[in-house]
Structures are given as C-alpha cells and as structure tokens.
Image: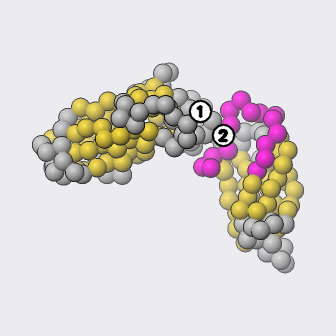
C-alpha cells in the first residue's frame, strides 16, 4: 500500500502485516507504539489496531536492539482530486508508440486516497486513440476498451496509442464531484 488512508474506518480495528527479515518490528500509530513483534518467516502481524488517520510507522531492529530501517505511510487529507502521471509526453507518429498514463485519486497533500474508488471518464482529442483503460480491480464487468472505468484503491491506468499524423493530443480525465484534469501529449 502507498498510504494509510481508509476514510470511514476511524475507530474500527485494523490488521497490519509487515514483511521484514529484521529481528524485531515495532509499529507506531501517530507516534504511539502498538507493540513490538518478532517476525515469523519474515512476517510480523499486528491485529486489532484501532484505525486513526495520520501516520503509521514500522521500525526494524537488529538483535542488539539497534534501529536498522523505518518505513512510514501517511493518510491522504482534504479534498479529493485527480492526478495524471504520463510515462512520456512525446510520442512518434508511427501508429505504434504508446503512453501509459497513471491516474490517481489523491488528497490535498498528494497522497493516494486508497479507500476512494469511483468511475472516471477519459477523453482524447487529436492524433491518438485510447488503446485501453482499466484498473487492477479483479472483478470487473467493464470493458477495457471503454472510456470510463472505476478506480481500484484510488488508481487506474490508461494506454494511449499515437496515430500516424504529427500534432498535439489533449487528454482530459473527469469524475463526479472532481475537477477535470488535462494534459497535452506531443506526436512528432
């Protein structure tokens, strides 16, 4: 997971699984220790941890008790918005070049809102086509050829194929209650 964002789960019990080859793992929730565990087969499980938004930290210790590693997850905060991250913005006009466009639902602090899933619509204008659009959701009925798809853990992915003509491509992504986001791709 990329974040500790579970809107609507405040006060409910959570299970946290940490994978580590450390001698001991300590779990902190908003700076308070939820205990230390010795991993079994490189897995430390913390059960019945009351969920509260903020920060969760896993601290790894060696056999002498010295901290060797620390990993932190933070909750998304504020209004939800769409973030577009293309792997490239320049494509060749050969009918083959692809742009993989990561689409995330994020909070005002830029953290992915893992518990927010909703249908997003993608529109493409210019010399390119939508090759596919989807998410990692395992049980879908939508077609990967549609221009709308529901996110999974706040994420989806669009694949855009360049056409044979050079020009500018405009990509717009929108969702109910969200500001539309737009980006430009160059087909050379």
The residue carrying pointer 2 sits among few (fewer than 14), some (14 to 19) or many (20 or more) residues within 10 Å by Cα, namely many
Position of 122 relative to 162 (above/below): above
Tell me whether circle 2 and circle 1 mark residues in contact (CB < 8 Å): yes
- Element carrying mark 1: loop
Label count reads 2
The residue carrying pointer 1 sits among few (fewer than 14), some (14 to 19) or many (20 or more) residues within 10 Å by Cα, namely some
State yes or no: residue 57 in magenta. Answer: no
Q: Position of residue 5 (x, y in %)?
A: 66, 40
Let me know if residue 177 appears in the view.
Answer: yes
Position of 36 relative to 167 (above/below): below
The reply, left or right, for residue 82 in relation to residue 6 is left
The reply, left or right, for residue 1 in relation to residue 104 is right
Position of 93 relative to 139 (above/below): below
The furthest residue to the left: 165
Which comes before the other along the chain, label 2 or label 1? Answer: 2
What residue do we see at 36% from left, 52% from top?
A: 87
Let me know if residue 59 appears in the view.
Answer: no
Q: Magenta residues, as a range? A: 1-16
What residue do we see at 30% from left, 37% from top?
A: 130
Label placed on residue 116:
1
Q: Position of residue 13 (x, y in %)?
A: 82, 39
Answer with the quarter of the image where residue 71 lies: bottom right
Q: Position of residue 132 (x, y in %)?
A: 35, 40
What residue do we see at 77% from left, 33% from top?
A: 10
The reply, left or right, for residue 71 in relation to residue 175 is right
- Element carrying mark 2: loop
The reply, left or right, for residue 81 in relation to residue 88 is right
Q: Position of residue 57 (x, y in %)?
A: 73, 55
Q: Which residue is mark 2?
A: 5
């Amino acid at each position: 997971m990329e974040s500790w964002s579970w809107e609507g789960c405040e006060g409910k019990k959570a299970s946290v699984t940490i994978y580590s080859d450390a001698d001991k793992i300590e779990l902190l929730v908003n700076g308070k220790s939820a205990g230390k565990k010795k991993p079994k087969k490189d897995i430390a499980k913390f059960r019945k941890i009351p969920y509260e938004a903020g920060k969760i930290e896993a601290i790894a210790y060696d056999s002498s008790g010295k901290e060797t590693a620390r990993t932190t997850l933070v909750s998304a905060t504020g209004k939800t918005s769409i973030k577009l991250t293309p792997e490239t913005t320049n494509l060749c006009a050969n009918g083959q070049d692809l742009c993989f466009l990561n689409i995330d639902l994020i909070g005002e602090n830029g953290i992915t809102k893992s518990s927010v899933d909703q249908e997003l619509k993608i529109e493409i204008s210019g010399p390119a086509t939508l090759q596919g659009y989807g998410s990692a959701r395992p049980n879908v009925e939508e077609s990967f050829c549609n221009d709308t798809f529901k996110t999974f853990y706040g994420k989806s992915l669009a694949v855009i194929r360049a056409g044979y003509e050079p020009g500018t491509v405009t990509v717009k992504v929108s969702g109910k209650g969200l500001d539309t986001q737009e980006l430009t791709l160059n087909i050379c």
